[in-house]
Each structure stands twice: as C-alpha cells, then as structure tokens.
Amino acid sequence: MPAFGNLKPDEIEAIVSYVRAWNKGPAVTYSTQPIQGNAVHGKQLFTQYCAACHGASGEGGRGTGVTFSRPRDLPVMAPALHNPGFLASATDAMIKATLMQGREGTPMVSFSKRGLQERDINDIVSYVRSFEKQPLAESAKLLQVENPVIVRDSPYDLKTTVENVKQAVSNNNFFYGRVQTLDYGLTTPDKENPRQVIVYFCNISLLNQALGIDPRVGMFLPCRITIVEHHGKVQVMSVNPEVLSKLFNNSELNRLCGQMRKSYTTIMEEATL
C-alpha cells in the first residue's frame, strides 16, 4: 500500500467517505483511554495465540495476500501490528474490541470464545501497545534509496558494449533474452533509433522467488539494461530495482530487490571494464 501523495486533501476525504459508506450502521467510536495490563504476560499470550498469523514480533503476515503465485493457508493476510500507522490509528479500546469480538469473514475469531479472560485480553492489548517503544519491525521500515538510476560509462562503442553486457549476463548466472531498440513498438521499424537499445535477461530461480513474494514485480521483470550512444559517448544504465520496491511496501521484496541491484551493478561494471 504505497502513499498517495499526489491526491489532494478533498480527494482523500472523498475516498474515505466512500469507504465509510459501506457501513450501513451507525459509526463506531472507541474510548481513547489507555488500557492497563501486564505486557509481559501479554507477550506470552501473543506468542501463543497471535504470532502464527501476525508474526512473532507483530510484523504481519508474509507476502501480499494475493493468491496468484503461491498457496496460502488463510483467506487473508494478517496485517502488521508493529506498525506506526496501525498503532496511531487504533486505540486500545479498538484493539480490545477486536480481540473480544473477532472479525467476521476472517480467521480472527473471538478470543473470549477461545477461553481468554478479559484481564488476559487487556494484557495482550498492553503488549501490542508496547510496540510503540520498540524498534520498528522490518515490515514497517521505509527503504532508503540513494540513486534511482544505476549508470556506468562505457569506454567501448555501442556494438561492443552490447556484446559485453550479454556476456556479463551469462557470467552472472542469468540467461540472455533479446536485444531491442528503446522505442520498439512506439514508432515504425524504419524510424527506430539503433543507438538506444535494451538488453533483456532473466534468472528463472530469481523470477520464481520474486513472484512468490509479490506478483506485482511482473511490472518490472524480466531484468533489463539500457545502452545508449549519444554524441559518441556510450552509457549503460538501469532503473534501480530498490526504487521500484519502495512502491510495494514489502520488506521481503526489499531484500530481493537489493540483491537485484547488486547483480545489475556487477553486470554493468563487468561490461564496462
């Protein structure tokens, strides 16, 4: 769920109002008073009853909840509780009500019906609230990216650089796919610019890992490196995969895109030695 910073305040309010309209009953309000409980005991109960879905440290379910590429045991993915957005918007009373009543249509059942006493539920609420004082879970950390584009200057001509990239692709356990002009499909073949080309390549194992983590990575796979000749100067470049990963707010994907960035950089540096 990326941020929608391009939306105006009235547009955001319109979306909120529309979503709120799905609730046909009166608006639910919760007390803002903190709930007192034993967070140490709450942690024990959280480990026993909550961690299987919400993660050992409240980091949330794995992946995106999309069934496209992998089997799942649950109809929905449990959200991260160790997340500043959740903790700022959910009062103790709301968390307690969810624990006591459950969530219809989800695996989140009433903990009261599972035999927990109200004091036990208060303890869990206190433990969840204690996340505010703990380091952020990995799933809640924002990926920091220095450069949106990876660029290397090539000392070779365009043709040699393309061949070098293809060889470096194979050297780094990827298979070469094809070379096409940058403007392929955007103009007629006779008007394509032969001095701007893209080398496509892939690694099936990497592809399967990426799709298993988040099917949306199909938007920037297979891997590709662009080679451009301009005024006699040849450059090799690619979008930094970590920049694209930021759009998906998925810490598992962040790690994989970090590996992809290293592979891209290695290939480009080998090709331009």
Image: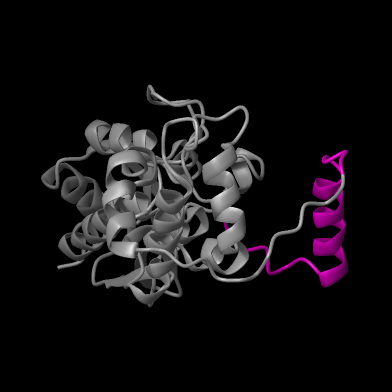
Q: Residue at x 55, y 54 (%)?
A: 95
Task: Decide which of 235, 256 is in the foreground and name it.
Answer: 256
Residue 30 as seen in the image, left or right of residue 115: right
Camera-side residue of 216 and 95: 95
Q: How many marks?
A: 0
**Residue shown at 61%/39% (left/top)?**
185
Query: Horizontal and vertical percent for residue 235?
Result: 36, 68
Q: Is residue 189 above or below residue 126?
A: above
- Horizontally, residue 100 falls left or right of residue 71, namely right
Which residue occupies the foreground of this view, 70 or 36?
Answer: 36
**Residue 270 among those drawn in magenta:** no
Q: Kindly tell me whether residue 105 is visible in this rendering.
A: yes
* Quadrant assignment, res 123: bottom left
The percent position of residue 131, horizontal first and vertical second, equals 39, 67
Q: Position of residue 146 (x, y in %)?
A: 38, 77
Counting from the top left corner in percent of width and height, residue 222 is at: 39, 40
Residue 187's place in the image compared with 144, above or below, is: above
- Residue at 40%, 41% (x, y): give it: 63
For this view, does 32 lie left or right of residue 111? right
Specify whether 118 is left or right of 268.
Answer: right
Give the magenta part as a residue range: 1-25
The C terminus, quarter of image: bottom left
Q: Image quarter for residue 39?
A: bottom left
